[in-house]
Image: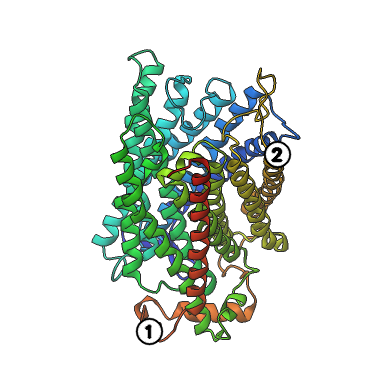
Amino acid sequence: MNATQAIAKFRTCKTTGLRVFRNAEFFTKVNAVLAVVFLLVGAIAAIGLALTRWTAVHLLDSVYYYRMLTLHGVNMLVFWIIFMEMGILYFASTTLLNSRLFSKTLGWISLGLMGIGALMTNYIILAGQADVLLTSYVPLKAHPLFYLGIILFAVGSLIVCFNFFATLYIAKRDKTYEGSMPLVTFGALAAAIIAVLALAHGAAALIPTFLWSMGWTGPVDPGLYRLLWWGLGHMSQQINVCAMVAVWYFMGTMTTGAKPLNETVCRGAFLLYILFINLASAHHLLVDPGVGPGWKIWNTSYAMYLAVLASMIHGYTVPASLEVAQRRKGFTKGIFGWFTKLPWKDPGFSAVMLSIIIFGFIGGITGVTLGTEQINIIAHNTLRIPGHFHATVVGGTSLAFMGLAYYLVPLIFQKEFYLKGLARIQPYLFAGGIVVMSMGMSFAGSYGVPRRHWDVDFSGSILSAGFDPIAHVMLGLVGVGGIIAFLGLLLFIGLTVAAVFFGRSNEGRPMKSWQDEHSTRMKDKLIEKGYEEEGKDYEHIKTPGTLTVVIIFLLTFAVYYFANWKALADLWFVR
């Protein structure tokens, strides 16, 4: 390939000045489109579930409730998230490193496997032959196509990871970038490494289960299956966390011109995820009789906190970098003057900022508390658990990915959004719904409402059973919050589809900024200073606003944590 041909493989983005490798751009686009398709499938199932948990409505019968619960979990926690993350891997390894993709052929193979696997899994669920929920705990047995579909999808994802690693190698070998790897790509690397570990656990859990479902081998040990499955299930969510944090840093730069305060510390936090998050998967088994107390205590009382430390580091450095950027622009009035001047009307920014707040204040605080062995006893298998992970995965990861889409479409698809006014309110609508739903779940769970049960009134039971009326009010909030979030999600999908397929092209010119001219000029000025000045300008700029938020966060955590210990003490009197 001569120089002219090599250049033709790239286009130069008129907004960022980055070179975009066209083959990688294609796979970024396709993965993003498929992600949105499966997001819609999962969302349709979600509204059915929310209106069933709302006891005054109780929409679905028991058969369709568990079918929709399986459909929702698989599409939201696997297909939507992983397809989007694969798109991020293609983008981070080529555009950000100024490098070509290692293999287009591998891209096609992985895309085929992932697409077939996702379609196969959805088909067999809708056919009513896989009502086993996402966890598919044995001895529950689904149709073999359920396991085979997930295995094919996982193999395809593994190939994308290999393509990603190989692209990093050739970028380093060909010296397509100077200095250390960009932090966003480093975060994507951490996500890819955890993905490989997660897929290894998935293979160990699901391949024997597939063989068993075919009748080729004997029963699978349920205890071993649970242990291995959570090596897949929990680490899969940490792939999300790494990708989400990488998006936080990327969007912080794109929307405000912010740059990480200390890249070494940030990279160290990503390493903590890789080293300790697999151990933290043990907190899903805190009431499992198959593993001993010493194993539970080590993995959840010590190792898990090192992974939590990583999130707390990112939870400080991202807002602090925003504060520094704002103060460098001259917004120095008081402790929170910079905060009020943030670009709240930019949906890319507002989605990411709301993601940080919801992930930290709701998902983070509840996660650490529920991961405590003693407290887990009063919360396990209640609706508090979904209340937690809807705040982390939906309010955190999904919302961050939505924010990314508001820049991905103009920059990669080169299409402009219609109805920008609606786009500006969409993150707030979706985030508001998720917060209401998550809080409703958490408080209903505090009254003991189970997480998966179809009928919490236990209709027809011989003995009188049920829950406090307040629990039903909270379940009503689950339904109301679910409706609001569903509307926000439909708005996002509608705006994105309209832009991608019918939007006005911006090819050959910069994307239209979501911010006013003055804000855009200040942001671009900070970005133009370049990464080579990293850290030098920040030494004399303090972050009192972020430190104040950190103190509020720690106080909130302390109150919630000890309130749970009080609830435990009220339940079990200890002399």
- Which callout, 1 or 2, points to the residue nearer the camera? 2
Whether residue 532 is situated above or below residue 204 in the rendered picture: below
- Quadrant the N terminus occupies: bottom left
Whether residue 180 is situated above or below residue 486 in the rendered picture: below
Q: Badge 1 is on which residue?
A: 539
- Amino acid beneath label 2: His
**Residue at the image position 32 percent from the left and 33 percent from the top:** 291
Query: Front-most of 234 and 33?
Result: 234
Q: Earlier in the sequence, mark 1 or mark 2?
A: 2
Q: What is the number of the mark on residue 472? A: 2
Indicate the position of residue 166 as horizontal and vertical percent values: 29, 51
For mark 1, does the 10 Å Cα neighbourhood hold few (<14), some (14 to 19), or many (20 or more) residues? few
Q: What is the number of the mark on residue 348? A: none
Whether residue 143 appears in this view of the structure is yes
Q: Secondary structure at mark 2?
A: helix
Whether residue 362 is situated above or below residue 119 in the rendered picture: below
**Residue at the image position 39 percent from the left and 56 percent from the top:** 308
- Amino acid beneath label 1: Glu
Quick one: which residue is furthest to the front in this view? Answer: 575
**Residue at the image position 66 percent from the left and 30 percent from the top:** 466
Among the 4 quarters of the image, the one containing residue 127: top right
Indicate the position of residue 356 as horizontal and vertical percent values: 52, 61
Indicate the position of residue 422 as horizontal and vertical percent values: 72, 59
